[in-house]
Amino acid sequence: MEFAGFAALAIIVAAVALVVKGWDVRLVLLLAAILIALAVGVSAEPGHYHRAIAGVLRTFLATFSNEKFVVPICSAMGFAYVLRHTGCERHLVLLLVKPLRYVGWLIVPGVLLVGFLVNIPVISQTSTAVCIGPVIVPLMRAARYSMPTIGACLLLGTSVGGELLNPGAPELLTVFTKTGVSTTEQTQQYMPRLVFTQLAVSVLVFWAMSYWWERKSNAGAPEPQTKEVGNSLPESDATTSPGPHINILKAMVPLVPLALLFASGLPEPYKLFDIPDEWVITRKADGTRDSAYNSRLIGLAMLIGVLAAAAVTPSKARGCVKQFFDGAGYGFANVVSLIVIATCFGNAIEAAGLATALGHLITGTPELMQPLAGFVPLSFAAISGSGMASTQSLYGFFHGPAVALGLNPVDVGALVSLGSAAGRTMSPVAAVTLMCATLTGTNPFTLAKRVAVPLLVGMVVVVSLRMSGVL
C-alpha cells in the first residue's frame, strides 16, 4: 500500500475519533474525503494532482441530483409524514398492539415484532419509534417492565431491519445502482431469508436477556420520567385503557404502496399487473425500458398511498400536499445528504487504493468475504450511527471482489445492508437510539449495550449459515 493508502487510514482513524466525540457525521466524512483526496493528489504523477479532488466533487454533484436516490427516498419520507398527519400510522400501531394487551408473557417479542412491521412501510427508524413509542411505553410500564428494557425493546424492534423489506429502502437502492437488480426483486428474493433469520435470533436472545435484566433491576429505584415527543398520538390513546377506536381502512393505508410494488414486481406468471411505462417514464428510442423506471415506480406508489390517506381522512386532506413536501424535504436533508457525503467518502477511499487492497485480501482469501461483508459495515455503522452511510460507502468495495470470485453481488449486498442495519441499531449516536432514549428517559449508551449482544449473535448466525451455504 502506498503513501495515499496509509494517509487514508490515518484520516479514517481521526474521523472515527471525531464522530465518537459527537461531531456531525456528514461534516466529518466530507472533510475526510477531501483530505484523503488531497493525500492522493500529493502522491500522484505530475499533471494529475487535481484528479482525486475533482473526482470527489463530481461524485458530490452527481449523487446530489441522482433521482435513483432522491425520488424513492424523498417520496417515501413524504408518505410517512402524510401518514402521521392523517393518523393512519396510529391506527396501524393500535391494530398491531391490541392483541398484546391479552398475552402479557409475549409482550417483549410482540413489541419487537410490532416495531419491525411498522418499520417496513414507514422506513425511517426514528419516525417508527416516535409512532409506536406513545403506545408501547405505557403498555410495557403497565406490565412492570423497567425503562431501560422498554427503551431497548423499542430500539431493537424499530431498527433491526424491517425497512430492508421495503423497496424504497436506500440501502437497496445502493445495491440496485451497482447491480441493476430492482429493489422490489431484492425484497422478494434476497433480503427476506437474511432479515428474518436475524430477526428470529435477535428476538429470542433479547427475550431471554430481558428476564435477566428485570430480575436484576432494583424494584425500589425511582422511575425515570419520560419526555413528551411529537404529536403522533393523542394523549387519550397513549394509555393502556382497552378499546381505543381502530379504523381498519386507515390502518391499511400504510400498506398500500407496498402492496402495489409487490403485486407489480412479482415474477411471471405470478405478477398481478404491470404499471405501464407512460405513467412514470418515456421509453427509449430502441424500445427498451429506462433504468429510472424502478425508482420512479416507487415514487408513484408513494403518491398513490398519499391519495389513499387523503381519501380515508377527508378532514385532513387539505394538508396532505404540504405534509408530503415537508417529509420530502426532511428526507433530502437527513437521508439523501448522508448518501451524498458517504458516496464522496467511498470515492476518496477507492482513489487511495484501500478498496483495491481489500479486494486483493478477499480474492486471496475467499472465505473472508462473508465475515467481512457482514462485520465491516456493522463496525462502520456502529461508529457513524448511519446504516445508509455504511452501505453507500462500503458496498462498492465488496462488489468487485464478489464478481471476481463468481459470487452473486446482490447476495453480498444483502449481507452488507443487514450488517449496516445491525451496526446502526447498536450505535449510541444513531438518531433512532437517541429518540428511544428520549422517549424512555434512559441513557443511549445503556440502550446500545442492551441490543448489541442480540444483534451480534444474530449476525454471527447469519454469516455462519451463509458460509455453510444454508442462506
Image (tube, rainbow, N blue to C red):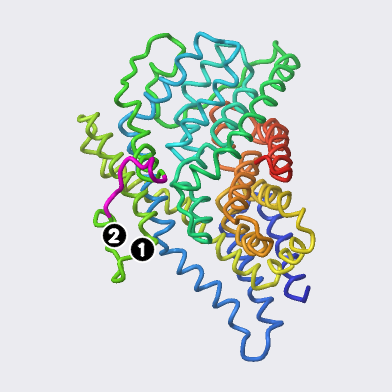
- Disc 1 crowd rating (10 Å Cα; few below 14, some 14-19, many 20+) is few
Q: Amino acid at mark 1?
A: Asp
Residue 7 sits in which quadrant? bottom right
Q: Position of residue 406 (x, y in %)?
A: 65, 60
Q: Nearer the viewer, residue 334 or 265?
A: 265
Give the position of the C terminus as an image quadrant.
top right
- Answer above or below: position of 440 versus 455: above
Could you tell me which secondary element the residue under label 2 belongs to? loop
Q: Are marks 1 and 2 in contact (CB under 8 Å)?
A: yes
Main secondary structure of the magenta stretch: loop
Against 65, residue 113 (above or below) is above
Name the residue tied to disc 1.
290
| Residue 34: percent from left, percent from top | 61, 70
Q: Secondary structure at mark 1?
A: loop
- Looking at the image, how many numbered discs can be counted on the residues? 2
Give the number of the disc on residue 281: 2
For marks 1 and 2, the one nearer the N-term is: 2
Which of the numbered marks, if any, corresponds to residue 343? none
Which of 116 and 271 lies nearest the eye of the viewer? Answer: 271
Residue type, mark 2 in image: Ile
Which quadrant would the N terminus be assigned to in this image?
Answer: bottom right
Mark 1 and mark 2: Cα distance apart in space: 7 Å
What span is colored magenta in the figure? 267-276
Q: What residue is rendered at 52% in x and 44% in y?
A: 189
